[in-house]
Image (spheres, rainbow, N blue to C red):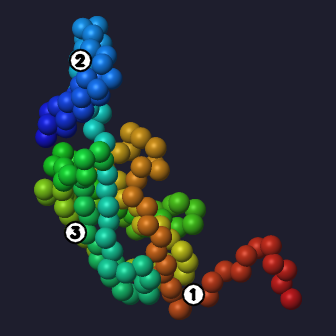
């Protein structure tokens, strides 16, 4: 598949050269060098992408958050079968994990769930997912999705900058 894409890119560049009338042996050698470097870069630097589909975005304590994980090549968006585990976490507003799970990946897919315990305060949270390989890069490449959790048994804390009456 990669060879087909690279051949397509090379073919388009050759067509452009013919249209412009710029056909030189030196350029051809540089083009082959660039294509070779691209192939080498593609082999050494795999770009992974994770997408998580949740059953909803609003939860009450005691409910179960069900999710499916899709693991694809970050460039071609085709399923990958390189990483075998994805890490899924629910982060609080301080980006501290309050729940976490490891999910097995088979053929670029995985499934899992979180039981929302009564010890979690109400608030806005972030569902985050990544592979071990993705930890080598900036966390902005991880999957992030906002979710809300309500705990009717614990009253929300008032912001500290509001004076008490």
**Cβ–Cβ under 8 Å for marks 1 and 3:** no
Label 2 CA crowd tier, 10 Å (few <14, some 14–19, many 20+)? few
Q: Is residue 103 left or right of residue 107?
A: right
Kind of element beneath mark 3: strand
28 w.r.t. 4: above or below: above
* Position of residue 89 measured from the top left corner of the image (x, y, whole percent): 39, 63
**Disc 2 versus disc 1: distance between alpha carbons?**
65 Å
Location of mark 2 (residue) = 32
The answer to which quarter of the image holds residue 18 is top left
Location of mark 3 (residue) = 111
Residue positioned 13% across, 40% down in the render: 1
**Disc 2 versus disc 3: distance between alpha carbons?**
43 Å
Q: Compare residues 161 and 11 and report the one nearer the observer.
A: 11
One can see residue 141 in this view:
yes
Location of mark 1 (residue) = 154
Kind of element beneath mark 1: loop
């Amino acid at each position: 598949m990669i060879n087909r894409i690279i051949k397509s890119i090379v073919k388009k560049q050759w067509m452009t050269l013919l249209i412009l009338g710029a056909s030189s042996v030196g350029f051809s050698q540089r083009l082959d060098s660039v294509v070779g470097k691209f192939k080498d870069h593609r082999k050494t630097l795999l770009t992974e992408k994770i997408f998580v589909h949740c059953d909803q975005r609003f939860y009450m304590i005691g409910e179960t958050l069900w999710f499916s994980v899709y693991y694809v090549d970050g460039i071609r968006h085709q399923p990958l079968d390189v990483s075998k585990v994805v890490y899924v976490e629910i982060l609080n507003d301080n980006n501290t994990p309050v729940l976490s799970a490891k999910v097995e990946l088979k053929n670029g897919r995985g499934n899992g769930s979180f039981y929302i315990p009564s010890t979690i305060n109400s608030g806005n949270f972030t569902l985050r997912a990544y592979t071990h390989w993705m930890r080598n890069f900036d966390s902005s490449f991880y999957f992030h999705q906002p979710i809300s959790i309500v705990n009717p048994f614990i009253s929300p804390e008032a912001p500290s900058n509001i004076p008490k009456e």
